[in-house]
Amino acid sequence: MFSFHLPESEFEGPLDLLLHLIEHRELDITRVSLGAVADQFLEIISAPGRIELSALADYLIIAAKLILIKSRLLLPQPEHPSPDGEEDVGEALARQLREYKMFKQVAGFLRERERQGLRAYPRFAPPPRPQPTTWKLEGVSVNDLAMALQRVLNVHPSLPQGTLTVPLSVSIDQQIHSIIALTKRRTRVSFSHLLESARTRVEVIVTFLAILELIKRRQISAQQDRLFGEIILVHRADAPEPSAVQPESDYTTD
């Protein structure tokens, strides 16, 4: 009989105790080694005050499995497989113990890194590359639209000093519906003319955001026949049905 002193603070749970017993005797985690340490396991958990009552049930379950494993090792067993392909109790406990040992080693590795202040890990995989949003602007760039907007803003006066807020005479959603109706009535709508029809700088910005939203939703397309030429808005023939278009714009004018 091997004598083995194990302070209570050195193990956490029945699997930890079982792993200590096997490693102390330098045994491999197998069904045979589990049967060899069964007596020591029972002796330790039988000591008064060794195991808290709240955790005793977990230890008793492992103890019952160890007794069954040892009895099967001592008594001859029929050479028939377990019914319905059921895994042997000894093999199942050995597998569970090997998995516990692996997780314990990983936990120890992480604990040591934390102790050393190593809380960062190198990235081995390349960073994800999000797919760019493709807005099909036929011969028109975003800079072209921005320059056209700036030209219109230059002819509208700025807000008077001391003015904090200006009530909107038209919302983005209202302007979206207005532009859709306009492009359906007319074959070609001038981008600059549409912006110049706004009465204030705020309405110019609202109209511009509505146009961007409609291009994003694939309701209209922006075309430019020549360099620095007029930007024309055209209703798309493949535009989705109004029910398929989100009811509210992603842009705000706060």
Image: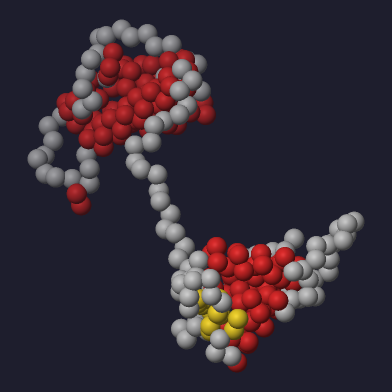
Residue 103 rendering spot, x and y as whole percentages: 36, 30
x 57%, y 83%: residue:
242
Residue 188 rendering spot, x and y as whole percentages: 56, 86
x 14%, y 45%: residue:
81
Q: Is residue 243 left or right of residue 101?
A: right
Label tally: 0
The outermost residue toward the bottom is 185
Q: Is residue 13 above or below residue 138?
A: above
x 28%, y 17%: residue:
23
The outermost residue toward the right is 162
Position of the N terminus by quadrant: top left
Q: Looking at this view, is 206 or 227 the one in front? A: 227
* Residue 79 visible in rendering: yes
Q: Looking at this view, is 230 or 122 the one in front? A: 230
Q: Is residue 218 left or right of residue 10?
A: right
Q: In this view, does 130 lie above or below 27?
A: below
Q: Looking at this view, is 32 or 154 the one in front? A: 154
Position of the C terminus by quadrant: bottom right
Quarter of the image where one finds residue 150: bottom right
Residue 29 rendering spot, x and y as whole percentages: 23, 25
* Residue 249 visible in rendering: no
Residue 77 rendering spot, x and y as whole percentages: 13, 35
Q: In this view, does 235 lie to the left or right of 31?
A: right
Colouring rule applied to residues: secondary structure
Q: Is residue 8 above or below residue 169?
A: above
x 35%, y 24%: residue:
105
